[in-house]
Amino acid sequence: MAKKSETGKKPASASGRQVLKAIVTSAEDIRRKVLARKKPTMKLPVRSLSNVRYQPERGFFEMKGQKKERTLTVNTVKTFAQTLRMVALSKELVENDDIATKREAYYVSKNWEEARFTEQPESDTVMDDVEAFFGVNREQLGFIPEEKGGDVAGRLVVIDRDRDTGQTLRIDCTRFGSGAYSIPISVEDLEFETQADFILAIETAGMFQRLVKHNYWKQANCVLVSMGGVPTRACRRFIRRLADFKRIPVYVFVDGDPYGITNIYRTLKVGSGNAAHLNEFFCVPQATFLGITPQDVLDYKLPTHPLKDVDIKRARDAIKNDPFIKHYRPWIKAMEQMLKMGVRAEQQALAKHGLNYVIDEYLPQKLSHPERFLP
Amino acid sequence: MTETQAAAAGTRKRQTAESMAERQREISISEFFSKNRHLLGFDNPQKALLTAVKEAVDNSLDACEEAGFLPSIRIAIRQVGEDRFRVSVEDNGPGIVKAQIPKIFGKLLYGSKFHTLKQARGQQGIGISAAGMYGLLTTGKSIVITSRTGAGKPAHYYEIQIDTRKNTPQIITDRIIDWEPPHGTRVEIELIGTYKKGRHSVEDYVRQTAIANPHCEIFYTPPDADEPMHLVRGSDLLPPEPREIRPHPYGVELGVLIRMMKETSARQLGAALQKDFSRVSAKIAAEICKAAGLRPSANPHTLQGQETERLYKAINGVKIMSPATNCLSPIGEEQILAGLRKEIDADFFTAITRAPAVYRGNPFQIEVGLAYGGRLPGDELVDLLRFANRVPLQYQQSACAITKAVLGIDWRSYGLPQSKGALPTGPVALFVHMASVWVPFTSESKESVAPYPEILRELRLALQECGRKLATHIRAHRRAAEEEKKKSYIEKYIPHIGIALREILALSENEEREVVTTLVDVLERSRSKER
């Protein structure tokens, strides 16, 4: 009874109603199977690089459609129960137009007695499964990430709305001084004003700080974005919408190691294997790779560190299994060159030639030939 | 002028051979040991207390068995001062003839065992008199002996001190007293010691002795108790008496060979070899003599040093049959199991007695017993119990061949976790026994067995055999646990599927129960089909 009145209380959004319908349908399906004395199953897309394909005209990793079937057996009963309870939690969130962070969801599970999660990675995995099962973005299920979206500075005005009054807010990203604008979790309703020539996406906060401190965006007439490692979905979506809106190029500046190339850059440009059903929205196909390339290491005589075992494994794996790297001859050559040299170089290695060498020499030289950037 | 300055100036008076000779004199064996008592196991107060108990109990058990009595031993430790203890060990053995009492307890290296090759707890005849000497040195008190050889005979009471200079007993008191037991011996020693529980404790020693000697009952009164604890007998079977054998030629050292030739009653070398050694036939004796370049008719008493050395080398070049092994008296698989069962609370027991083997001409036999599970602690290293001729070895674990053999085995393949170079971990008590006419100890205090390759090999084979049996048990146990776990999985998690479906579909309690019971049934059925 209480249930009914609650359901009727909040008219969920159109996408919310769709999700609710999908949840109820799948639960009914499971119940019907059980009552027919059959073992219920859940079909989930395989969430890995082996289940994506890359087509440059589409611009992102698309799912190939392999599915794994999770049948309820003695061995899977725990995960099955946890997945269903997570779905039930999602239904409650959507119905009440509420949200839970991934960490909060993990703590909610502490009420589930034996079915609770011991560590958050377990609940994150189940959440990813639920997301992929319904083929939606986790925000649509009421789950939001903990992580920060990324920092922005430079020639850009972001137009947002005041939560209480609904009034328009103009956020001028040139006026943060030595600070920066923080990308929010949901960027779908933001609007932009900009005269910038390009967007520079940077891996490390340290390099971002240096460029902000010296107002590099003024000199190069650009927008600076700090990704802080692998870019979050919000950060990818923000860059994508901004680049689409003004039709400006995106240049990526990361460490010259397998992680910077295959994890950070590749995820930004074409998405990930883990959440492939969403890559269409969370990718930046117009991005190109400014540096640090293995060739830069030679051209700029950068100090290096030897590749670690995990670097070597990652590079070899990318050449063999990553559909994106495999598609581009120049990338294969670059990865092979790195393996042959056996070294990696960080962005900040440029400081060897002077702290502002990156501003005065490296970036201007590179930016004078964007056609030479790796795809 | 100080002495050093004088020495530096070269003016100090030098010693002459004559003046040095004045101070040179024979060091008696007892004097030597009183200064080197660590060699006998009296290096610290805790160990001294343990060693005193141990030596007395060894003697009592040997005496009882030899005389054919099922041993009943009473051990009591009384605290008489801050660090002073009075140890008393009483047996129901045959007693000791009056004339022998002072020599046995008041003279080092006096015993029945050194001159024979026979499996026994004591070997050198040092132990009990050394314990008495230690007591005398630390407290000034005599060793007190009470003994009676039979119901009709008087009980003799002695207080004895050992004269360390002369290695002779001094009788302080000698009288006849009233004593209840019909036969037996009681030894009392007062000494400076430390009483501790846990590892290396008297209590541990008593318990291990009870395991290796299930035919023996022990009453033990520690200093902090009034009533004795009773370690009951696990078997009424006396171990078969070990037989005495003559030494095998491969086992003698040069010094022993020289002595044997000097003391032999034979008048010809060939006869001496045949008579005093085992497995030497006339043919073998002739072969040895020929290889040594000596006549079989030579007089063994007049052999020169070099000749004996040639003889010694020749022996090791001639192929001689292995010694007879029926002289050994192993504990036996049944008895080991009985000992383990009565003293250790575990789920699984197994034991192995290997066939006898030979190292350096000495027959020996390895036995391994293993207890697993029950109340043994599962997260600690395996409890390794080492024994030689039924005597627990409590010190110098890492130097011992038994430990080396245990470490040399990959216990992970038998289902026990094991870090590199360490004992395995698990709820296991591992019992390892070596029986031999001559156990090769690494020192006089008899705490660890020397690692001869033949001994290591037998140890390894016995341990592996026990390991395989353990592995079978553990696997069966795990399978059962796995079954149990799967069953509990169903009971644990299915209700959550019910809860989730109720929340999503707004089911009634009855509808929820219907889903849960059906699902449990479906899974149970499919599980029993899998099996």
Image (cartoon, coloured by chain):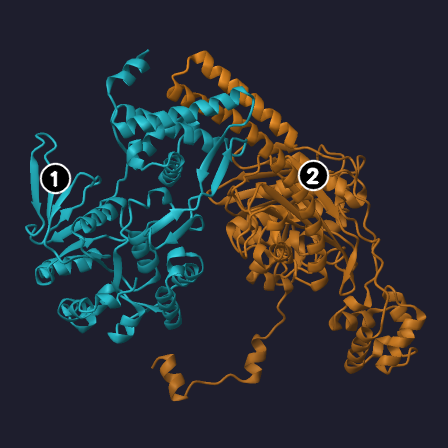
Which chain is represented by cyan in the image?
Answer: A
- Please give the name of the residue rendered at 18% of the width and 71% of the height, measured from the top-left corner: A365
**Picture coordinates of residue A335 (x, y %)?**
37, 66
Q: Chain of mark 2?
A: B
| Position of B490 relative to A187 (above/below) | above
Q: Which residue is the site of mark 2?
A: B339
Q: CA distance from mark 2 to mark 1?
A: 84 Å
**Picture coordinates of residue B338 (x, y %)?**
72, 37
**Picture coordinates of residue B359 (x, y %)?**
75, 63
Name the foreground residue: B199 vs A282.
Answer: A282
Q: Are the residues under badges 2 and 1 in a single subunit?
A: no
**Picture coordinates of residue A112 (x, y %)?**
39, 26
Which chain is represented by orange in the image?
Answer: B
Is residue A142 toward the left or the right of residue B244 in the image? Answer: left
Q: Chain of mark 1?
A: A
Q: Which residue is the site of mark 1?
A: A160
Name the foreground residue: A373 vs A165.
Answer: A373
Is residue B264 toward the left or the right of residue A260 in the image? Answer: right
